[in-house]
Image (spheres, helix red, strand yellow):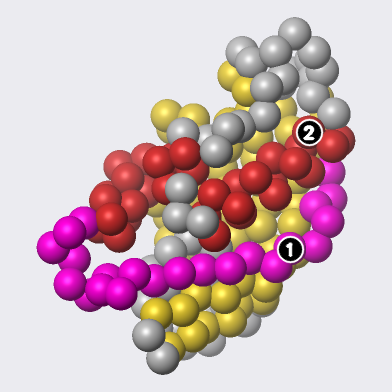
Amino acid sequence: MTTLDVKNRDVTREDLIDFVYDEVRMLDFGHYDDWLNLWTKDGMYWMPLDYQQEDPIHETSLMWEDQFMLRLRIERLAGARTFSQKPKTRCHHVIQRPYVDRIDNEAGEYLVTTQMHYVETRLDEQILLALTATHDLVRDADRLLIRQKRVDILNCDAAFGNIQLLP
């Protein structure tokens, strides 16, 4: 799967919306290496533990994963000896049209917010999460990259089992 080419032009509202749709499609179809290539080297995936949490560093989060942890998660999912993933976990995102909250072509910074339902399934178990994803994107020469993705689960204060994939 290819990513959006924004070489020699301003990023548009539609480019940002397409980026989010492309990202969830990569996750739904298991194109994890393509998905990892959407991130900056210092990109962070954040899933707060509390409603309207402000600080991922000094407060406990459900997930606060850097590139090393994201790659480790993906390698574990793809591993031939990961017997807990036989059969593999699958996911499906049902997203609303993303809101483009900021376009700053001069600085190369963009903010997009998307409400969605996320379904994860393996064998007879299925979880459904209602969530809001906020993509903090930056321009890197001819493409967009994720600097931070924040995923706020609607009932974040509930008890959860393992979330294997990434909403």
Above or below residue 75? Residue 120 is below
Quarter of the view holding residue 66: top left
Looking at the rendered structure, the number of numbered marks drawn on it comes to 2
- As drawn, the residue found furthest toward the bottom would be 124
Per the image, the residue denoted by label 1 is: 95
For the question of whether residue 138 can be seen, the reply is no
Judge from the rendering whether residue 21 lies leftward or rightward of residue 26; answer left or right: right
Residue at image x 80%, y 52%?
Answer: 98
For the question of whether residue 117 can be seen, the reply is yes
On the image, the x and y values in percent for residue 143 come to 63, 23
Identify the magenta region.
79-101
How busy is the neighbourhood of tag 1: few (under 14 within 10 Å), some, or many (20 plus)?
A: some
How busy is the neighbourhood of tag 2: few (under 14 within 10 Å), some, or many (20 plus)?
A: some
On the image, the x and y values in percent for residue 92 come to 58, 68
Numbered disc 2: secondary structure? helix
Residue at image x 70%, y 49%?
Answer: 21
Per the image, the residue denoted by label 2 is: 15
Judging depth in this view, the residue of 18 and 44 nearest the camera is: 18
Residue 133 inside the magenta-drawn segment: no
Above or below residue 130? Residue 31 is above
Above or below residue 149? Residue 140 is above
On the image, the x and y values in percent for residue 108 come to 71, 21
Residue type highlighted by circle 1 = Ile
- As drawn, the residue found furthest toward the top would be 8
